[in-house]
Structures are given as structure tokens and as C-alpha cells.
Amino acid sequence: MTLKRIRLELAGDPHFPEGSKSHGYEFVAPLDPEGRLLPAEWRAERGHCRVTRFWAGEASQHGRLMHRPGGSWVFDYDPGRSDDDEVGFKLGNHRFAPGEYVSFTEQDEALRCFRVASVQAL
């Protein structure tokens, strides 16, 4: 099985110049041996591909990792809405390995960078 639990933590930004371990995401996704997302396996396992957004001082949000037509990947918190989706920037091209960086356009329209803190087999 290729499903992994991935933890992303906020990298430096104007409010947190040193980054923050209290702001980020934990999600489950299928990864190849190099740490890249696997769309075909996601289709077969999408019910397991859940996300939790944790943000200090706010209630956690729970949703799903979704692969949209055209290839983009998003965190979707309410299937009936799209204004709450958080869109990954070219996630299909990134490696999910500790120390790597990925970016998301969040619900407030801000593009934020996150560091891959951990990747664990399920």
C-alpha cells in the first residue's frame, strides 16, 4: 500500500518569520517511492485521503484531498462549496519528503508556503 500520512507545517511568512509548527495540515495520500502523488491510486483510495487543517487559536477543519479534472489537487472541506477549497500549487510536480516545500492558496486567497515535516507509512 502506498498511502502515507503527511504533515505540513507553515514555513516562514510575515506573521511567522521562523515558520510555525502550530499551523498546517495533516493528510493522507498515495505516494510513489520518490514521494510524488499518484492520481490513479488516489481514485481507488480517495475515501481514505482525508485532511485536517490545524491553525493555532482556531477549530480544526476536516476535509478531503481531491484531484480535479485538469490535474490540480485541492483540500476540500465542503463538497457543496468551492469557496472553501485550498488549492495546491503544482502539487503533482512536487515531492513529499521531509524538508521539501509546497504552497497552497488558502481560503483567504493568500498563497502560503509549507514545509513537509514528516511522511509516515500507514
Image: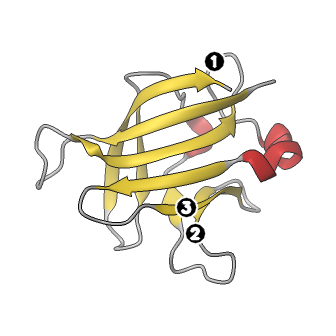
Location of residue 58 by image quarter: bottom left
Q: Position of residue 50 (x, y in %)?
A: 64, 51
Q: Nearer the viewer, residue 59 or 41?
A: 59
Q: Which residue is mark 2?
A: 77
Location of residue 78 by image quarter: bottom right
Badge nearest the viewer, 2 or 3: 3
Q: Quadrant of the N terminus?
A: top right
- In the image as oriented, which residue stretches furthest toward the top? 33
Q: Which residue is mark 1?
A: 34
Q: Quadrant of the C terminus?
A: top right
Q: Amino acid at mark 3?
A: His
Q: Amino acid at mark 2?
A: Tyr
Report how far apart the C-alphas of labels 1 and 3 lie in the structure.
27 Å
Mark identifier at residue 62: 3
Report how far apart the C-alphas of labels 1 and 2 lie in the structure.
28 Å
Badge nearest the viewer, 1 or 2: 2
Mark identifier at residue 84: none
Relative to 28, 109 lies left or right: left
Q: Nearer the viewer, residue 114 or 71?
A: 114
**Earlier along the polypeptide chain: callout 1 or callout 2?**
1
